[in-house]
Each structure stands twice: as structure tokens, then as C-alpha cells.
């Protein structure tokens, strides 16, 4: 077992090294140059689309959900523990400078998302049950042809592993146990297996009651919960930052200066700062990983560029706004210099400003964001299984997924975390390769759409 763990760890270290930085960040820069940044001029149109100004409910329009629900579903998959724990890890391992490189990943990720989401509509395919589906595997099959199918199979296989709920559930159970159960005598610090197991079963029942409704119910839940929780997060975080407002400018300056020195934590090793920032940025907004295409591919539209414009809002909301707020919270309160790690670090920050109930405020946010991530990951994983083994077998994935939610509440995560990290990195390869190859198709569709939009065709 030790040899297996070591092999997986070595694979993860290799995959999340320079090759993936070049593929994700370099690919994003290519899309920026290739598009000449034209899509950046249409952010106002993106929000018009999200407000439903151009929605078409005609039966001739493909897809199942609106632009807004597609984005909400995609954000549900990205806005979870990565926005809190991921930022804390970035600060602990890479220092404040890692946040700067998360910003860089998000900025280039805007173009990556525009390209991948546009392709998700351009190259939707029919599964063996006759339903219209989107995602990298269909983009590869429909856009590149059957000779590229091994690349599609690689994404689907990695997607089934990378979207498992074990990490999210395990960390959520830990937060509830440490914040609520142990202080109130519901579980012992040294013996909490029964509490974790019961809570895991409860979480599985909640997830099952929603997932049986397929993407429409998942997107409906995400469409209500994610925006509400983001507003709640901003309200709580705004109070914290206002109470430390005099430190905010100096912390922003520290993020920028440390990005090119690495002195704060990494001893001047700038490469470490960059790699940690890119890794955490990729986990935060998933630009180039491919999961976002699964959500955006379900949007009800026949205009591919529209979904690309909607998708590019994701990295802005997820990384440039939410993760930046989290980073400033940890920096201005000084908790990043202490010994706490992960979500515990964030709990300490909120407790400073909201004594006695700050951890509970964090718990509310983490519970909702983690559960919406678990729900979205089920949808992603089931689509990957359906592509590999047939849509009629997706129901088996549902039962296996529920069992893994229960297992995730009690298992040790050492090997699982590396397995999930490795799968995530693997998913980026077919996603980015296919997007780079099909980039000229996206550019042609975008030029056509923008010309018609500028000419007032949609007014």
C-alpha cells in the first residue's frame, strides 16, 4: 500500500508541476491572443443573458436549463471548500504571493471558459438514450472525430474519479463535528465514529432526495442556494473587512510584492509560489479542467457564443471576488501566520470579529456550498459514466455515489486526496488539447455572433 501511495503522490506532483502550468496558463494566454480579447468587450451582454433578456423557450432550442441555471450549476461545482480551504492552503504553502497567481489563473481562465463553454454548445452529442448531452467527451467525439475517442475516454474515466464526493463530505463532517457536536457533547473528541457515520447517512439522504430529479432539480437548487449564499458570504465578510479596513491596502500590496519574491513563506522560491497559486486557482474556478463544460452544455440555447459569454463570468465571481475576499480575511486578521490550517484558519478569523458565533457563520456557508458541490459533482460523474458505459447505467452510479457520501464521512483521506488531485490534473489534458485544436472554430462562431449582435439583430 505504501508503494501505491508513493506512486500516486509522485504522479500528482508531476502533473501539478510545470507541464500543467504551461497547459492551463499558457493555453489561457493563447486563447486571449487568439481571440484578440474581443469577448472582454461584451460583459454587459453576459449579464443581460443571465437576466434572461435573450432566453428562448422554443422547443426547437436544445438544452434543458437557462443560461443563469447553467452558470449557477457550474459555480456550485467550484464554490465550495476550495474557496475557503483552498485559499488557506495557498497562503500556508505559497504565502500571500500565491493569491496573485490565482488571480492570473482566473484572468486567463476567463478566455479559457469562453472557449470551452462555446464548444460545449457547438459540439453537443446524442447519448445512447437519445438525449442531447454536452461536455469534453462529446466535444472530442463530435468536433474531432472518432479517431480522438481515446482522449474522450480518458476525460470520462478521470471525471468519474475526480468528481467523487469523499473529500467534500469528509471535510464537511469534520467541520460540523468540531464546531457543533464536540462542544455540545454530541460526540467525543477521541471517539466520534458513530456521529460521523450517522451524519454521513443524513447527508446521503439529503443528496439523494435532490439528485433523483436529474440536472433540472440540481440546477434549480443551485440557482437558489448559490446566489443566496454568495450574498450571505459577502455580507459577513464585508463586516470583517470593514473592521480591519486600514490593513486592506497593505495586504493587497503584500500579495503583489510577495508574488515576485516569495519571501513571506516560501523562502524566496518563486516557482513554488507560482505553482501553488496556479494549482489552487485551477481548483477554485476549474477553467480548463472540463467540468464546467458539462454544466454549460446543458444550457437551453442554439447560440454557442452566448454560453461562452455567460461562462466567463465564473472565474470573476469565483476567484477574483470570492477567493480574494477569503484571502483578505485571513491576511488582515493575521491568522495565516498561526498554526491553524484549512477551514480551521478561516474559523479563527471569523471568531475574531464575531466572538462566540463566527465559526457557526462559517459553518452555514461551508455546509451549503459543500452540499451544492456534492450535488453538481454527482451530475458530472454520472454523465461521464453514461458516456463510457451507457446512459441506462447512470442509475448505478447514483447508488454508488450515495454510498461514497457515507464512506466519505468516516474514511481516512490521505490516499484519496492524492487520487482526486491526480484525476483533476488528468481531466485537463483532453479538455485543453481539444479546445486548442478547435479554437479556430470558436473564433469563427464568435466573430459571426458579435457581428450580428453589433448590427442589432437581437434587439
Image (cartoon, rainbow, N blue to C red):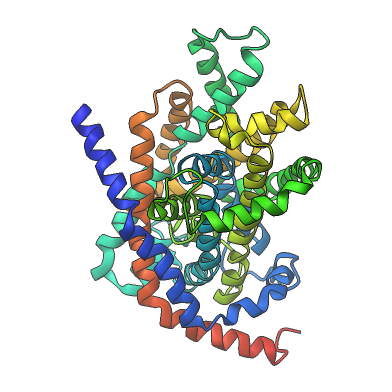
Q: Residue furthest bottom?
A: 455
* Residue 410 vertical position relative to residue 386 in the rendered view, above or below: above
In the rendered image, the quadrant that contains the C terminus is: bottom right
Q: Position of residue 74 (x, y in %)?
A: 57, 54
Q: Position of residue 316 (x, y in %)?
A: 63, 61
* Residue 241 vertical position relative to residue 319 in the rendered view, above or below: above
Residue 447 visible from this viewpoint: yes
Q: Position of residue 49 (x, y in %)?
A: 70, 70
Residue at image x 56%, y 7%? 188
Residue at image x 29%, y 55%? 154
* Residue 360 vertical position relative to residue 424 in the rendered view, above or below: above
Task: Judge left or right: residue 201 versus residue 440.
Answer: right
Q: Position of residue 132 (x, y in %)?
A: 48, 63
Q: Residue furthest left?
A: 3
Task: Judge left or right: residue 448 versus residue 230.
Answer: left
Pick whichever, 311 or 317, lies toward us. 317
Number of marks: 0
Pick whichever, 422 or 163, lies toward us. 422
In the rendered image, the quadrant that contains the N terminus is: top left
Locate residue 351: give its quadrant: top right
Residue 297 visible from this viewpoint: no
Locate residue 267: give its quadrant: top left
Locate residue 137: give its quadrant: bottom left
Residue at image x 43%, y 24%? 407
Task: Judge left or right: residue 373 versus residue 278.
Answer: right
Amino acid at each position: 500500500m505504501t508503494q501505491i501511495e508513493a506512486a500516486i503522490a509522485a504522479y500528482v506532483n508531476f502533473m501539478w508541476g510545470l507541464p500543467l502550468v504551461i497547459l492551463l496558463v499558457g493555453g489561457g494566454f493563447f486563447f486571449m491572443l487568439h481571440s484578440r480579447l474581443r469577448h472582454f468587450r461584451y460583459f454587459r451582454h453576459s449579464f443581460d443573458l443571465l437576466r434572461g433578456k435573450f432566453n428562448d423557450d422554443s422547443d426547437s432550442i436544445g438544452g434543458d436549463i437557462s443560461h443563469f441555471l447553467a452558470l449557477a450549476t457550474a459555480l456550485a461545482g467550484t464554490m465550495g471548500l476550495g474557496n475557503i480551504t483552498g485559499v488557506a492552503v495557498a497562503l500556508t504553502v505559497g504565502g500571500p504571493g500565491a493569491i496573485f497567481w490565482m488571480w492570473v489563473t482566473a484572468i486567463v481562465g476567463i478566455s479559457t471558459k469562453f472557449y470551452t463553454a462555446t464548444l460545449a454548445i457547438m459540439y453537443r452529442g446524442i447519448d445512447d438514450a437519445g438525449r442531447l448531452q454536452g461536455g469534453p467527451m462529446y466535444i472530442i467525439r463530435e468536433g474531432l472525430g472518432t479517431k480522438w475517442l481515446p482522449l474522450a475516454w480518458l476525460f470520462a474515466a478521470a471525471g468519474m474519479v475526480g468528481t467523487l464526493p469523499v473529500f467534500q463530505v469528509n471535510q464537511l463532517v469534520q467541520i460540523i463535528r468540531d464546531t457543533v457536536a464536540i462542544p455540545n457533547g454530541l460526540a467525543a473528541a477521541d471517539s466520534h465514529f458513530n456521529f460521523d457515520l450517522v451524519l454521513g447517512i443524513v447527508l446521503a439522504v439529503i443528496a439523494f432526495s435532490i439528485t433523483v430529479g436529474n440536472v433540472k432539480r440540481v440546477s434549480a437548487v443551485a440557482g437558489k442556494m448559490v446566489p443566496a449564499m454568495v450574498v450571505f458570504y459577502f455580507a459577513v465578510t464585508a463586516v470583517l473587512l470593514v473592521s480591519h479596513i486600514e490593513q486592506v491596502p497593505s495586504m493587497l500590496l503584500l500579495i503583489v510584492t510577495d508574488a515576485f519574491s516569495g519571501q513571506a513563506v516560501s523562502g524566496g522560491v518563486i516557482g513554488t509560489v507560482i505553482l501553488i497559486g496556479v494549482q489552487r486557482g485551477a481548483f477554485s474556478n476549474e477553467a480548463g479542467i472540463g467540468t464546467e463544460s458539462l454544466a454549460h452544455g446543458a444550457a437551453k440555447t442554439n447560440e454557442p457564443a452566448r454560453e461562452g459569454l455567460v461562462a466567463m463570468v465564473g472565474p470573476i465571481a469565483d476567484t477574483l471576488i470570492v477567493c480574494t475576499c477569503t484571502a483578505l480575511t485571513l491576511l488582515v486578521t493575521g491568522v495565516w501566520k498561526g498554526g491553524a490550517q484549512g477551514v480551521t484558519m478561516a474559523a479563527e478569523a471569523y471568531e475574531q470579529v464575531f466572538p462566540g458565533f463566527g465559526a457557526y457563520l462559517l459553518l452555514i456557508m461551508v455546509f451549503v456550498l459543500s452540499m451544492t458541490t456534492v450535488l453538481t459533482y454527482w451530475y458530472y460523474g454520472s454523465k461521464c459514466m453514461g458516456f463510457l458505459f451507457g446512459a441506462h447505467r447512470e442509475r448505478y452510479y447514483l447508488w454508488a455515489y450515495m454510498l461514497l457520501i457515507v464512506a466519505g464521512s468516516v474514511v481516512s483521506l490521505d490516499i484519496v486526496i492524492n487520487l482526486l488531485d491526480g484525476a483533476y490534473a488528468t481531466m485537463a489534458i483532453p479538455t485543453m488539447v481539444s479546445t486548442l485544436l478547435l479554437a479556430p472554430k470558436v473564433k469563427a462562431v464568435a466573430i459571426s455572433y458579435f457581428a450580428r449582435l453589433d448590427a442589432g439583430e437581437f434587439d
